[in-house]
Image: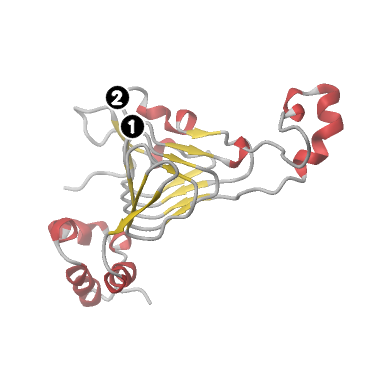
Amino acid sequence: MTPDPSTVHPLLAHERVVFLKPLVAGTTVVVGDFTYYDDPDGATDFAQRNVLYAYGPERLTIGKYCAIATGTRFLMAGADHPSMGVSTFPFTMFGGEWTERTLDLVAGMSSRGDTVVGNDVWFGYGATLMPGVRIGDGAVIAAGALVAADVPPYTIVGGNRARTIRQRFDDSDIERLTRAAWWDWPVELVTAHARTIMAGSPQDIERIATAEGLEQQ
């Protein structure tokens, strides 16, 4: 039996673990199946407590099978202040004549755009993502990392500002895994090959995808 991705609490004895997809419906956050967040204090408030400054149209998109540790935060483009002149003070947000005189300046600000996280990404404790970054499939974000730039697939980053620690696989194996895209397999196939997905090689994953006619071009 496999877990139901539409269930908020997949582990009945551990309410600190939640599947995010059913929790973010109706928000500017989109999350794929089986991506979970772990937090002993208010895990169900992820969209309010961990997705910050989501005032604009920009979206946070997170793929499938991601693991997100306690305290991981996603700063959205609403956190940006005007910097076209002398002051970065956000006069516009306080209403009244301040808003009337400055709204056009804020409306004309460029946006860093959507934040996009791939599939099978692991976020360590207390990681922070700046607005508009893109995280590739299979990446690992170390605990406490401040990510201000895009992270390639299957790359481990850490530090403040986050920098590449190492690539998890060589380029040819990353290409194999990208084409195999195991996270898009039917859940029954993922279940049947869960052991291989956890402990096998990129070549093993490629063979399964090829045999099942699921390899992407």
Instruction: Check if mark 2's residue and mark 1's residue have beta carbons within 8 Å.
Output: yes
Q: At x 35% / y 52%, what residue is drawn?
A: 64
Q: Quadrant of the C terminus?
A: bottom left
Q: Amino acid at mark 1?
A: Thr
Q: Amino acid at mark 2?
A: Pro
Is residue 10 depicted above or below 65 in this figure?
Answer: above
Q: Position of residue 159 (x, y in %)?
A: 38, 43
What mark, if any, has residue 40 been given in the picture?
2
Q: Give the crowd class for mark 1: few <14, some 14-19, many >=20 residues within 10 Å.
A: many
Q: Position of residue 25 (x, y in %)?
A: 47, 39
Choose the circle earlier in sequence order: 2 or 1: 2
Q: Give the crowd class for mark 2: few <14, some 14-19, many >=20 residues within 10 Å.
A: few
Residue placed under numbered mark 1 in the picture: 70
For residue 195, which quarter of the picture? bottom left
Q: Position of residue 91 (x, y in %)?
A: 76, 27
Q: At x 14% / y 58%, what residue is drawn?
A: 199
Is residue 175 depicted above or below 20 in this figure?
Answer: below
Classify mark 2: helix, strand or loop: loop
